[in-house]
Image: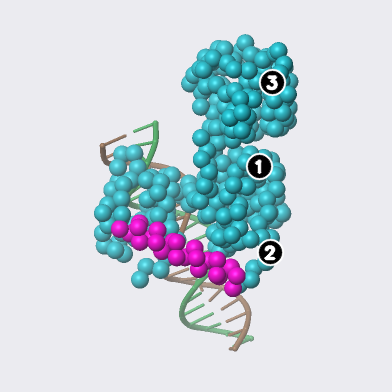
Chain colours: A cyan, B brown, C green
DNA sequence: TCTCGATCCCCGTCAAGGCG
DNA sequence: CGCCTTGACGGGGATCGAGA
């Protein structure tokens, strides 16, 4: 009997992602390791489970069958997991350090489910990506969710969601703006020392837009301050623009308080990573909480 | 019976290369 | 160029046997 649930879980993720490299990012191991997991499963069942394609992989008929059995198995395991947590009576509080966007807009949406299905004693607090990883290393938290991975030894990073930074304005602009139009706007900018500002600069560089030539009217340290300022200018005469995560402004867009426009050729996406210490990789709680957050975050991002 | 060192083996990464 | 496989290599846990 194939008892190794790690490999079966890797197979499930490969099936869901339809790519070995994408699955490896989600699992937090290298691509060859994922290939090995699949090979072991294939040699155990003595049949091919996936077709290797140009742009990823597809399940064979046997692969499909195995996948659906595993889906059922996973559901059953989840039920037992709850019982096990009750049984072993772990009572420590699991702390999750996360960035503002995650802590304010994403985690609250999936926390109820994680708490009721996996473990009730979970708390989260907001920190910068650097602080979160620092706290992880100093054992002040068990899990960190960061927008930019500061790759450190002894920490496992698992790819999570993708967040998009969009051009936001306090007045309606034309539907699509050109790169050179950005020089004519009054900008509400972010402190260039912040990681998000660096990401924005990198993307603008690619479009040959010189961020130091933009007319920065005001500069803030936090994205939330940019948002507050733009909202405060809704009634004003002047037009201001800034980059904000789409998740921050969903409600304001709906209520027509703020407006977002596409910049031709610019897709400002940043990946979010869930991180935990290597020595905790076999900790059932950390493993299950991480897994649940990564795969069951029931939110629609865009 | 316990401890400690040698050895084995599993599991992972890295680097190179093949394929479409 | 992106995606996957292969092969070399290393770290670390498990196992085993000798000695106290």
The answer for how far apart the CA atoms under marks 3 and 2 are is: 46 Å
Q: Is residue A284 left or right of residue A130?
A: left
* Viewer-closest of A81 and A194: A81
Which chain letter goes with mark 2? A
Q: Chain of mark 1?
A: A
Residue displayed at 55% across by 70% down: A84
What numbered label is drawn on residue A234?
3
Q: Are marks 3 and 1 in contact (CB under 8 Å)?
A: no
Instruction: Point out the frontmost of discs 1 and 2.
Output: 1
Name the mark on residue A104.
Answer: 1
Q: Position of residue A174 (x, y in %)?
A: 54, 14
Q: CA distance from mark 3 to mark 1?
A: 23 Å
For residue A144, above or below residue A217? below
**Range covered by the magenta-colored residues:** A65-87
Q: Which residue is the site of mark 2?
A: A92
Tell me what residue is drawn at x 62 percent, y 11 percent: A184
What SS does tag 1 mark? helix
Q: CA distance from mark 1 to mark 2?
A: 23 Å
Q: Position of residue A164 (x, y in %)?
A: 55, 32
Question: Which of the marked residues, 3 or 1, is nearer the chain's N terminus?
Answer: 1
Q: Position of residue A61 (x, y in %)?
A: 26, 54
Image quarter for residue A118?
bottom right
């Amino acid at each position: 009997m194939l008892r190794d649930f790690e490999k079966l879980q890797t197979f499930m993720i490969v099936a869901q992602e339809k790519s070995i490299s994408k699955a490896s990012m989600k699992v937090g191991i290298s691509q060859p390791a994922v290939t090995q997991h699949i090979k072991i499963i294939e040699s155990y069942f003595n049949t091919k489970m996936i077709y290797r394609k140009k742009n990823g992989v597809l399940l064979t008929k046997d692969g499909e069958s195995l996948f659906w059995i595993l889906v059922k198995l996973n559901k059953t395991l989840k039920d037992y997991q709850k019982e096990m947590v009750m049984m072993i009576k772990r009572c420590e509080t699991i702390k999750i350090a996360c960035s503002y966007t995650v802590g304010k807009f994403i985690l609250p949406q999936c926390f109820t489910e994680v708490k009721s299905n996996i473990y009730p004693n979970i708390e989260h607090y907001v920190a910068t990506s650097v602080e979160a990883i620092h706290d992880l290393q100093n054992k002040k938290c068990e899990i960190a969710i960061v927008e930019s991975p500061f790759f450190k030894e002894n920490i496992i990073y698992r790819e999570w969601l993708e967040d998009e930074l969009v051009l936001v304005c306090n007045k309606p602009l034309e539907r699509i703006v050109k790169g050179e139009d950005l020089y004519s706007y009054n900008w509400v900018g972010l402190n260039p020392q912040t990681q998000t500002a660096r990401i924005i600069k990198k993307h603008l560089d690619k479009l040959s837009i010189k961020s130091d030539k933009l007319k920065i009217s005001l500069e803030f340290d936090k994205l939330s301050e940019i948002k507050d300022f733009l909202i405060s200018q809704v009634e004003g005469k002047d037009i201001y623009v800034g980059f904000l995560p789409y998740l921050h402004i969903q409600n304001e867009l709906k209520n027509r308080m703020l407006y977002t426009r596409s910049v031709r050729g610019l897709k400002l996406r940043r990946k979010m990573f869930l991180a935990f210490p290597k020595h905790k990789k076999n900790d059932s709680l950390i493993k299950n909480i991480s897994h649940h957050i990564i795969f069951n975050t029931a939110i629609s991002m865009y």
